[in-house]
Amino acid sequence: MNVILITACPSGVATTFLAARGLERAAALRGWTSAVEMHGQLAPVKPVDLATLGGADLVVVAASAPVDLSRFAGKRLYQAPIAEALPDPVAFLARAESLAQPYQPVPVAPAAAPVTAATPSGTPRLVAVTACPTGVAHTFMAAEALTQAGQALGYPVRVETQGSVGARDALTPEEIRAADVVILACDIEVNTARFAGKRVFRTSTGAALKKSQATIREALEKASVLQGAAEAAAPAEKKGVGAGIYKHLLTGVSFMLPMVVAGGLLIALSFVFGIEAFKEKGTLAAALMDIGSGAAFKLMVPLLAGYIAYSIADRPGIAPGMVGGYLASTLGAGFLGGIVAGFLAGYTALALSRYVKLPTGMDALKPILIIPLVATLVTGLVMVYVVGTPVAAMLASLTTFLKTMGTGNALLLGVVLGAMMCFDLGGPINKAAYAFGVGLLSESTYAPMAAIMAAGMVPPIGMGIASVLARRKFSEPERDAGKASLVLGLCFISEGAIPFMAKDPLRVIPTSLIGGALTGALSMYFGVQLMAPHGGLFVLLIPHAVNHVLAYLFAIAVGSLVTGVSYALVKTGQAELPGAASPQGKGWRGGKGATVGSN
């Protein structure tokens, strides 16, 4: 039999790939010829060709995200949530073969009224945007949590995710016009000009994920009207100063992160030819080093500063921010100087935009002449004459301390960084530790990043281990979530443990802290150095990306086992994950129990 296998989950990161591979193996066991189509972020979607489509006897769709099925009209098709395919792919295919029916596409409603057509009179209509600094886990988990919460409350919610590959499921102008409330569950700054005049409620991805129904209720009650472009450009001014500063910093880190990943891995690839092979001019190793260290790493600090300023002052802040960041690099002030330059440029540009008044006929000169000129001049002069030298000295002292610290200090730093990574799983403390490690990469200090990534993998791996060791203490949805959590942990997606933490924080947090602190300490003790800030165990496939591979794996394994065994011992009872029960049917995995399985 010829079968087409299609998998899709809201984030398109781990579950899409795992389900596809499981179904492909199951099809081979049944003697079927399969063609796989994955809708995810790991690779561009490659639709099956017309010849494969024409010869298909069965189409199996394991999807919890929208997939266009109109091309399969008339084909025998079976569709179910992707979570049903993971535990037993063989049984899933057997079900598909017996229950498949000829597919008849449902007529599509006019694009101008997708929400209002199915909305009872008087029911609030909501749209939302989710975005986190890395754009990998929290973004999509929060999106699904809001969608499920809206279904439970009877409110239609349309969510746009602004993840690592850009905006997906973008809100249309018609949907925005029809919405009563806009929810911005964003840990970084996003462009809100299109929501001017709408009632807007701001929150974090963590709040939307852990308290999704409460977030929707609070949004309906407390949302305020976004007045116009000026307010949209600087929304953080309405919040506490600390919250605004933290959000601006994370915005800069999120834009800098791809450059750090690319630069670090290119440097690691240059080491494949030998640790010092790049010193020989004209070789491939030298070219890789020039691209990674000579270009990508030199752009890291200007990007960081530029997008911190962008978060504060919108587009007028980019030019002075990047100039200030470049000066920070050339003056030796590094990422600390870049942070200072970003805030200085952003607030200078914002002040010029708000307080410099020009005649109506000359007002158009502000964004193209006055703000770039004055903000860049002020930022540059302050960096050169005031900030550059002392920050450079401070950074040099920090770098020297980290590179020459004794075993005791290294262990202590590893414990602190490891515990910070495991305390709130993507929250402010976790992101502060991560930003610290990423910043040090630009100074060729790689040990803290190794401890940070290793410790960040511990909670989700530990929860997966616990769900296997103490199987009877976990309900079926929890065991499914544990499998997904284990895979997400191997990918360094700490958020895989969030559903467990949300349900049982008094046990999950302490056991995760112990394991993470131990892993961080061991990583620092062994002197492990890591070139890339993301990727989990997959970066080990690149020679020299990690210097002491076996010691690194040992540190991760020990911490994960400590967390997993500890939680298996202290967990009591058998209970559903938050939102695991749903009125939508037996096969449905709703709420936060589903967000792990769908990331």
Image (cartoon, rainbow, N blue to C red):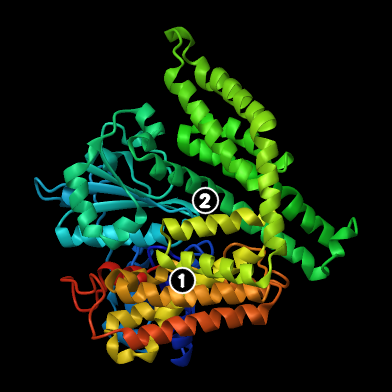
Q: Name the residue located 37 percent from the left edge and 83 percent from the top edge.
A: 567
Q: Quadrant of the N terminus?
A: bottom left
x and y, in percent, of residue 308 in the image: 52, 40
| Residue type for callout 2 | Ser
Residue at 41% x, 81% y is 464
Q: Locate residue 277, reporting x and y percent.
A: 86, 65
Horizontal side of residue 277 vs 14, given as left or right: right
Which residue is more in the foreground, 501 or 294?
501
At numbered mark 1, what does the secondary structure look like: helix, strand or loop? loop
Question: 329 and 481: which one is in front?
Answer: 329
Upstream in sequence: badge 1 or badge 2: 1
Callout 2 secondary element? helix
As drawn, 305 above or below 402: above
**Pair 1/2: label in front:** 2
Residue wearing tag 1: 14
- CB under 8 Å between discs 1 and 2: no
Give me the residue at 82% from left, 68% from top: 275
Q: Quadrant of residue 382?
A: top right
> In the image, what residue type sits under mark 1?
Ala
**Is residue 555 in view?**
yes
Instruction: Depth check: give the residue in front, 181 or 246.
Output: 246
Question: Between marks 1 and 2, how big is the CA–CA gap?
Answer: 21 Å
- In which quarter of the view is residue 112 placed? top left
Q: Which residue is mark 2?
A: 254
Residue 209 image label: none
Residue 319 placement (x, y as % from top left) = 59, 31
